[in-house]
Amino acid sequence: MKSDVFYFTARTHSHEQSMSKFKGPLALKKLGIEQRIKSGDKIVIKTHFGALENTRYLRPSYLRFLCDYTKDLGAVPSLAESCGWGVPESVSGVHTEYSGRATETEYLKTALIHGFTEETMGAPILMLDGEDGTDIEIQKINGKRFNEVLVAGRLRKFDYMIMATHFKGHASAGFGGSIKNLGIGCVSKGGKVEAHTGKTFEFNFDSCNLECKNCINICPTHALTKDDDNKLSFNEELCKFCYMCASVCKDEVINIGHVPRVEFITQMVDNAKGVVDYFGKDKIFYINFAIDITYQCDCTGGSDIPFVPDIGVLASLDPVALDQATVDLIHKSSINPHSILSEVKNIPMQGPFEWFSHIPRYDPQSREMNFNQDGKESKHWETQLKAAEEIGLGTRNYNLIKVEIEKDN
Ligand code: SF4
Ligand code: SF4
């Protein structure tokens, strides 16, 4: 059984072919959204506003036109993201390339700098897991690694979801598309941590610094307290698993795990399944904007030159078919001669070629870029697609339906 994937090329000869104003909304129309939603339905458009210094996130007008389109259909749209891992820079005092996304307050400031406000979008903007990532719904699943997923809790307020995803590379996941927008983007702050680390959350109480109250001050739920003797205690019943306490503990009292890349991908896909099971498979419309396809994700400040030319807008009701089709179109393309891919030895410049197998990675240990010059292929992009298919998120088989604006609409 194949899933339909609608494809609008990035080639644009006139304003009627606008990628933002027409192709985005038309992609939703092709998915049958007009037959599904009723007047007054609440729709959340889930996207990524970009890390503070990122410059390749989706331009605001792509999202504004989706908001306007859903309003024309009588729906009530909101634009959403979810809190990033860690604590705000105002607490940590440390600026990193991931900065600017730790809480709703902090992320809305970044969103504003990037052009996303209620005024520019014509719709409210919110973090799906609340101010500090503790608004959660726990969804049971039969995953490969997880039996519970920390779904972003404010999803409960919406009738339908549009996953408006900027498609690009990703250092750990192989690529970042709709599956990742579910498994990282629609879980809580702690759900993101768990995808990266597993569910290890251990306290080495004996190492606790008697003078310190860092974790107590940051904990939004008062799950951590100290008694009169400054002895730390943890009330798991109150904990909402934001893991901010682990981020502020400098004495290795609060320990979270570390997992290799394949485990991260497996856990991210488990998360994605939890989100779909919670929200409802038939209530999600997926769009990939395959433009500005950088080798790194929007969650980093390092926005390089896109490594292939723009591909276009793709849409499906099946996130696996959609991501597979987008990967395949990128692999058919040739690489940008000025991009980082051009520095990778022993690969061609012309496609078709599996570019995602050769995406360079920054090695935090050596603090150097790994250009895969040892010739080893990284098939993590395929690991993600296989895992998503195996867990039942969709199929890798698809019908690619190219839509010509003039002829078909
Ligand atoms: S104990 Fe830690 S993980 Fe739990 S809510 Fe408090 S800060 Fe978050
Ligand atoms: S942050 Fe670490 S050292 Fe400080 S009180 Fe909490 S557990 Fe103890």
Image (cartoon, grey):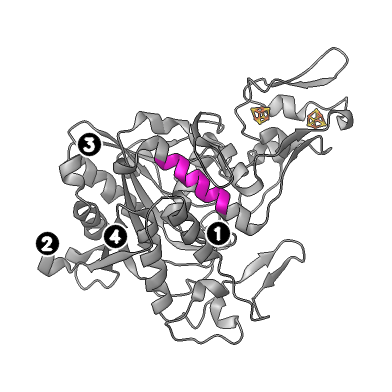
Residue stretch rendered in magenta on the structure: 266-276
| Residue pictured at 54% horizontal, 73% vertical | 357
Q: Secondary structure at mark 3?
A: loop
- Residue 173's label in the rendered image is 1
Mark 2 and 3 residues: CB-CB less than 8 Å, in contact? Answer: no
Foreground of the two, 119 or 367: 367
Q: Is residue 275 magenta?
A: yes
Which numbered disc, 4 or 3, marks the residue that appears first in the sequence? Answer: 4
Circle 2: is it few (<14), some (14-19), or many (20+) Cα within 10 Å?
A: few
Tell me the amino acid under the disc marked 2. Answer: Asn
Majority secondary structure of magenta residues: helix
Horizontal side of 108 relative to 31 (left or right) equals right
Tell me the amino acid under the disc marked 4. Answer: Met
In this figure, which residue is indicated by the disc labeled 2?
Answer: 409
Marks 3 and 1: which is nearer the front? 1
- Residue 75's label in the rendered image is 3
Quadrant containing the C terminus in the rendered view: bottom left
Which numbered disc, 2 or 3, marks the residue that appears first in the sequence? Answer: 3
The reply to whether residue 48 is in sight is: no
Circle 3: is it few (<14), some (14-19), or many (20+) Cα within 10 Å?
A: many
Marks 4 and 1: which is nearer the front? 4
Marks 4 and 3: which is nearer the front? 4
Looking at the rendered structure, the number of numbered marks drawn on it comes to 4
Rendering quarter of residue 248: top right
